[in-house]
Amino acid sequence: MDYWNELADSVLSGYNITREEAFAILQSSDDEILRLMDAAFKIRKHYFGKKVKLNMIISTKTGYCPENCGYCSQSIDSTAPIEKYTMMTREQIIAGAKRAHDLKSGTFCIVASGRGPTNRELDVVTAAVKEIKEEYSDMRVCACLGILRDGQAEKLKAAGVDRYNHNLNTSKEHHSNITTSHTYDDRVNTVGKVKNVGISPCSGVIVGMKESLEDVYQMGRALKELDADSIPVNFLHAIDGTALEGTDELTPLYCLKVLALFRFMNPTKEIRISGGREVNLRSLQPLGLFAANSIFIGDYLTTDGQERNSDYQMLKDLGFEIDYDNAEDREEVLNEYK
């Protein structure tokens, strides 16, 4: 048995990999990539079989953000030409949920730009969520509204929000190189607030922002300590007009090694290949799902995603199964792509 499979067996027995082993994954030879992904798949298959969760985003408020995040086209410092609009209406958000349902997405993600929601914005979201849960009882609803103030997590929970996303984005040590308008601890505290009220925590990272290998390791370690149920792994899609414009540090093979590392470090958690997968993994996107068990379908916040039929076809070609709570939805998609 090779080294990577032995390490996977250790992880399945409850072992936490060391810093040195994490670095070995990130610095492994490209010639070892298939063995590494096979080992990551052993862990992934043990906990999730061959199922893939589908998620879909609606950007309910775009632009007008006071934060200075260097990766974001919606940053106050960004000169990227993006569409800007204030909070959608309740009816528009519900219409987005219908589209997500029609596209067979199991999770509908309600995202809004800004430091955090105003009380009026929160009222719109919670009213929409109540109706969505009544109409589509099998659909999971995730909210991503920024830093929460006291009492706001409780309102989201009461409305029926299943999951809340607030990414750490990078390591604590690298955070001030990416943004200075809020702290790393602000992000950690928001994750803590949603956990405390019983909402499933979702928190992830953006890789490719001039971080070190140590930073990547510390990201995985921090998410393990946070006990995030879902971990979106974004790969920087550098946008002209942002502080990270022109940054191009990633290769498809390195992205696969990062996904493998996060599977080894967080074996029981949902690992989602998120923003930037199309431009960074490119033709190797299918291999990423041997470590990850979740993807976004449709577009992202201000960048385009892959055409949904291509994603469905990719999953079929891999022999993977879309993870639906509703058996009728699963059967419909399987029949369409036989």
Image (cartoon, helix red, strand yellow):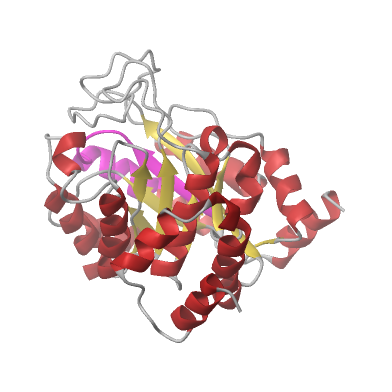
Query: Residue 286 colored magenta?
Result: no
Residue 145 placed where, x, y %?
Answer: 29, 44
| Count of numbered tags | 0
Q: Is residue 149 visible?
A: no
Q: Nearer the viewer, residue 205 or 217?
A: 217
Residue 130 vs 20, above or below: the answer is above
Residue 227 placed where, x, y %?
Answer: 31, 69
Residue at the far right: name it. Answer: 338
The residue positioned 36% from the left and 43% from the top of the image is 206
The residue positioned 26% from the left and 47% from the top of the image is 170
Q: Is residue 163 visible?
A: yes
Residue 195 placed where, x, y %?
Answer: 26, 67
The residue positioned 46% from the left and 82% from the top of the image is 10
Taking the image as shown, residue 236 lies to the left or right of residue 251, namely: left
The residue positioned 32% from the left and 25% from the top of the image is 86
Residues in magenta, as a range: 105-128
Residue 2 vs 310, above or below: the answer is below
Q: Nearer the viewer, residue 185 or 290?
A: 290
Taking the image as shown, residue 205 lies to the left or right of residue 259, namely: left
